[in-house]
Image (tube, grey):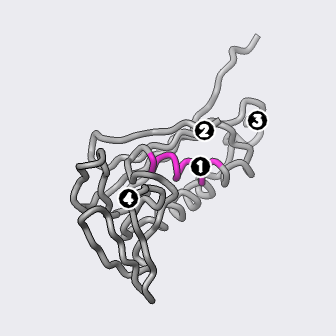
């Protein structure tokens, strides 16, 4: 009898990165200053157990997965990431600009350099969840059911989310 096993593909390329500005909101009184990170992304893809790799010797061409990961991280690269769902975030479009009010702060950004994310905070946990949701949905066409996405904001400081 053959032992049961699973195979996981680990994708962690140098170009799976995005550089973005954000600030964290801690509580009703404190929040970080606007600052940036060079985020790094790692994706682990569990091969569906029913896939027979004996003929080809591999599950799927890595390049398909790599292109999709790169496409997703590029959407956030060199942008300001703001939490659209935070109750104190007031955002108004003015022509080609976004005026952003948060408590006593006031920012004006070029509209095309901002991503308003459907979160209450732009934490690394929320970024990993959002990115993972997009990749999980995209990878379903290849039969992927289990996926782990990690986003590292600073070397040694990251969050990961597992999708089934």
Tell me which segment is drawn in magenta: 126-136
Dot 1 or dot 3, earlier in sequence: 3
Q: Dot 4: what SS?
A: loop
Q: Quadrant of the N terminus?
A: top right
Q: Dot 2: what SS?
A: strand
| Residues packed near mark 4 inside 10 Å, few (<14), some (14 to 19) or many (20 plus) | some
Are the residues at dot 1 and dot 4 in contact (C-beta closer than 8 Å)? no
Disc 1 to disc 2, C-alpha distance: 8 Å
Dot 4 or dot 2, earlier in sequence: 4
Q: Which residue is mark 4?
A: 88
Q: Is residue 106 left or right of residue 122?
A: left
Are the residues at dot 1 and dot 3 in contact (C-beta closer than 8 Å)? no
Dot 2 or dot 3, earlier in sequence: 3
Are the residues at dot 1 and dot 2 in contact (C-beta closer than 8 Å)? yes
Where residue 96 sits: x, y (%)?
A: 43, 87
| Residues packed near mark 3 inside 10 Å, few (<14), some (14 to 19) or many (20 plus) | few
The stretch drawn in magenta includes residue 104: no
Where residue 56 sits: x, y (%)?
A: 73, 43
Dot 1 or dot 4, earlier in sequence: 4
> Which residue is drawn at the image coordinates 43% and 50% (left, top)?
41
Dot 4 or dot 3, earlier in sequence: 3
Residue furthest top as drawn: 1
Q: Dot 3: what SS?
A: loop
Disc 1 to disc 4, C-alpha distance: 25 Å
Q: Nearer the viewer, residue 105 or 65?
A: 105
Badge count:
4
Q: Is residue 5 left or right of residue 35?
A: right
Q: Which residue is mark 1?
A: 133
**Helix, strand or loop for the magenta stretch, by majority:** helix
Residue furthest bottom as drawn: 95
């Amino acid at each position: 009898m053959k032992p049961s096993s699973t195979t996981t593909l680990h994708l962690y390329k140098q170009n799976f990165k995005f550089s973005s500005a954000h600030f964290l909101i801690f509580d009703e009184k404190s929040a970080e200053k606007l600052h940036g990170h060079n985020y790094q992304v790692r994706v682990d893809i569990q091969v569906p157990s029913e896939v027979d790799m004996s003929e080809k010797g591999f599950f799927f061409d890595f390049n398909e997965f790599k292109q999709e990961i790169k496409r997703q991280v590029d959407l956030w690269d060199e942008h300001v990431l703001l939490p659209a769902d935070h109750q104190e975030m007031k955002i108004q479009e003015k022509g080609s600009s976004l005026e952003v009010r948060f408590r006593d702060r006031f920012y004006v950004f070029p509209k095309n350099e901002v991503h308003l994310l459907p979160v209450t905070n732009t934490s690394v946990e929320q970024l990993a969840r959002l990115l993972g949701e997009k990749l999980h949905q995209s990878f379903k066409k290849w039969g992927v059911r289990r996926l782990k996405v990690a986003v590292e904001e600073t070397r040694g400081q990251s969050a990961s989310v597992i999708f089934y």
